[in-house]
Amino acid sequence: MEAAAVNPARVAIRVRSVALSAPLLLVALVGTSAIVRLLLALAHPTPLFFADEYIYSTLAHELATTGRPTIRGDAASFPALLQPILTAPFWLFHDAGVALRLTQALNAVSMSVAAVPVYLLARKLSLRTWFALAAAAVTLLVPDLFYVAFVLAEPIAYPLVLGAVYAGVCALSEPTRKNQLAFMLLAGLAAGSRIQFVVLPIAFLGAAFIARTGLRRLRLSLALLALGAVPVAIKGLGYYSGVGDFSIEPGQIVRWFGVDGMLLAYAAGWLFVPGALVALATPRGRVERAFAGLTFLLALGVFVEAALYATNADVGPGGRFQERYLFTLVPLVVLAFGVWLERRGHGRTVVLLLAAILVAISARFPLSGWTDDHGRQDSPFLMGVYRLEEAIGFGTGSLVVAILVALFATAAAAVAFRPRLAPFAVAGVVLFLACVAAGAWSLDARYAQRARATYFPADARWVDHAGLKNVTIVNTPGSHRELTLEQMFWNRSITQLARIRNAGAPDVFASPRLRIGADGTLYLRKRVFRGPLLIDEYAVNADFRGATSVRSTKLFELWKPNGTPRLRLLAGGRFYDGWLANSGYVRVWRTPGTLRLRLSLPQNAPPARLVFRARGVRRVVTVRAGAPQRIAFTVPSGTWTLRWKGPLYYLPDFRPVSARADSLTLTPAA
């Protein structure tokens, strides 16, 4: 029987229909991702990532209202201004809530658009259409897309970095003026969104040697790079100038290279890693050499930055996984795997060996060791894994993750011998990343909603709506910086921050000390202070003469001056819910009278022996559960201080306490 004749016209129609459907599918992926991400972001009602979100939002607000990049009146010297410039129009509504939601909408579109350069790069590498779409889907399922909900630069940088890599591969393989201009523009914008990506042009020049693209053909790129380096040489890095003081510890840097590489392999789904490493190590042709060189050198640059930051920054004991630096590499790892897949089994033995090493690493360093509160703080992937473990039980969850990782490593070896299994293996990784991303979103929504309920009344803009202008927020001893910066994000009538006594600063920007005079008068920058005050009462209670309390929340009190505000009383070491720290003081300025305290302990609490001391006074009080005690002290004229010291207990939120002072009142003498 004769074989059916092939109809060339019908084949041409089918090829054309496939070519037309792929871009439509890509547009559908991008649009669906943007809509879904925005809807998910609505469950994130307040910023959480401080001080970064305060910096970006304040720069945007100041650009919109004054035209200058300032923070609390001082020039910020912040080189990464692209995100504030793009979001500045949102602050013209003069409503932080509206600006937050519009920023989230921009972020949803921006991060979703990152699928486009990944798809184009896949086609540039001659990868199959199905794999190009799969790589675009993985780009949209990276757990780090939960940054859509935050006022950060990551959503803006994500598509720019991937677009710069695509343009860089085009420029290195075909160094036309158009391609070089496109790369330098995208690389400059990426560095303008996150200064860490200043490594892109450096990686580009290094990749030129690997791609065997003569530097003479890249004269335009060299000229533009030299031109861009001039302002950096003149002005420096401004806000980031402290990087020059980082200490270089080779041992720690090598350690963090290993930790970051391992956790990035986890975040990339493990399946892609063995084949990707083989493809990057053995590129073929100029396009593959350009891609391998640019990917390798970009990865090297951001790995060095992440290791330096983890080694030097004050991020807690042992540092932590800096996924914010590295997650843009995940789509590039997927594309490198696609290059290896097209070779139909090239380097099978090496892939098999690498897969076995990955299984051994996952057994030796399980993810459960990194998903604690500290380890997952900068890692959406680890947040998602923690949420999955939490949902099904930590022991069971750790076992399930270990089994999945072993299966993906085994699948990598299987694909080396049976390439037809690749679509199923890739689908498994896509499903895994989708589950982890959903876990990260769920955990973030819980944290954000809890913060909103804890830090604010129903009206987050309660200070703005009090009608006061140029309010000064006062950081007090023991206060938490996120409490201060949250208030300043939502209430733009707070224009100044000051610190009282030995309180710390929430960031590196202007925070002058508020000095207390002998009569309780406040001095700021050597001048008597007469403006409205917002007092952080997390661990301090304050009372004033010459000012009236107009509004308050559980953690803050707003005072309106009706003359010159002067402190009448300051209690340091009494928390917002009445608990006394194990030591503290009450200081009274020129208000003779009687100080009264009601002390108590909750049921089943051990007894607390407190010693109170003042000038000529020493009193020992033992407080027992269920037996409140009322004590009183006579306050003389002048400045008078009462100090206490008690036992040291800890609440579940780790506050050091001794007993409760349910009430603390000063009654002036008649």
Image (cartoon, grey):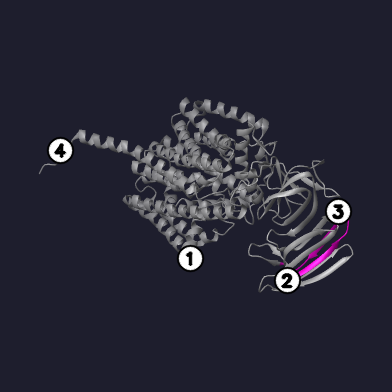
Q: Nearer the viewer, mark 1 or mark 2?
A: 2
**Prevailing SS of the magenta stretch:** strand
Q: CA distance from mark 2 to mark 4?
A: 99 Å
Residue type marked 1:
Gly
Q: Which residue is mark 1?
A: 393
> Judging from the image, what secondary structure is the residue with disc 4 in?
loop
Using residue 133 as the reference point, say whether residue 320 is left or right of it: right
What label does residue 5 carry, if any?
A: 4
Please name whichever residue, 629 or 584, is drawn nearer the observer in this view of the structure: 629
Q: Nearer the viewer, mark 4 or mark 1?
A: 1
Provide residue 257's location: percent of width, then percent of height: 56, 50
Q: Which residue is mark 3?
A: 590
Q: Earlier in the sequence, mark 2 or mark 4?
A: 4
Packing grade of label 2 (10 A; few <14, some 14-19, many >=20) is: some
Packing grade of label 1 (10 A; few <14, some 14-19, many >=20) is: few
Q: Earlier in the sequence, mark 3 or mark 4?
A: 4
Q: Which residues are magenta?
A: 628-648
> Judging from the image, what secondary structure is the residue with disc 2 in?
loop
**Compared to 219, does 576 lie above or below?**
below
Q: Earlier in the sequence, mark 3 or mark 1?
A: 1
Please name whichever residue, 137 or 541, is drawn nearer the observer in this view of the structure: 541
Residue type marked 2:
Pro
Q: CA distance from mark 4 to mark 1?
A: 60 Å
Residue type marked 3:
Arg
